[in-house]
Amino acid sequence: MGVRFCTDGNLILIVVEDSEEEIRLKQKQQQQKKEKNIKERIKAAKKIQAWWRGTLVRQTLLHAALRAWIIQCWWRLTMDRLRQKKRRAALISYAHTERAVVKLQSLVRMWRIHWRYCQVLNAIYIIQYHWQCHNCQTCALLRGHCVVTATHLQFHIEIINP
């Protein structure tokens, strides 16, 4: 910094000039302030950009998770309906099989009872035939009694003499 004095009559003019070195130093300080300000602004801009990118990523992940959840719910519902159809088909098949088994058992029981009845009837016919052919002094009457149970057919014959 240099000082100059100029006198022009009654007026004294003092001019203070900075040296070139001081000017360069001030310019350098100003440049550093500008660079620091620019760096701070860039840092702030990066923070804002990072926040915005994070927000977009979180939003995208949220949408993806919601879509995945919707697909999973749909898939569970579809599988549940399929299981119900299979369960219903198995139940219907079981009911048809049981009905057929019961019908078959009923037919077999009926056939066995009919067969036993036919045996007893044949025995009665044989007894009646022999009784008619048998020539006896007194005539007797035959009285029969039949009892049918689930497993047996009982037939009692009584010979009654008058």
Image (cartoon, rainbow, N blue to C red):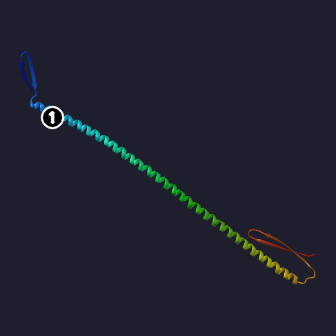
Which of the two residues, 72 or 110, is positioned nearer the viewer here? Answer: 72
Q: Is residue 12 left or right of residue 31?
A: left
Quadrant of the snapshot with the C terminus: bottom right
Q: In this orientation, which residue lies closer to the viewer: 129 or 22?
A: 22
Quarter location, residue 18? top left
Disc 1 marks which amino acid? Lys
Drawn side of residue 62 relative to residue 120, left or right: left
Seen at 80% across and 77% down, the residue is: 121
In the rendered image, the residue lying farthest to the top is 10
| Residue designated by label 1 | 28
**Residue 120 coordinates in the image, percent (x, y):** 79, 76
Residue drawn at x 42%, y 50% is: 65
Figure label count: 1
Q: Position of residue 87 (x, y in %)?
A: 57, 60
Residue 146 location, x and y as percent? 81, 71
- Seen at 85% across and 82% down, the residue is 129
x and y percentages locating residue 7 in the rendered image: 6, 18
The correct choice, above or below, for 148 with respect to 30 in the image is: below
Residue 25 position by quadrant: top left
| Circle 1 SS class | helix
The quarter of the image holding the N terminus is: top left
Above or below 84: residue 115: below
Q: Residue at x 17, y 33 (%)?
A: 29
- Viewer-nearest residue: 4 or 50: 4
Q: Residue furthest front?
A: 9
84 with respect to 122 (left or right) = left
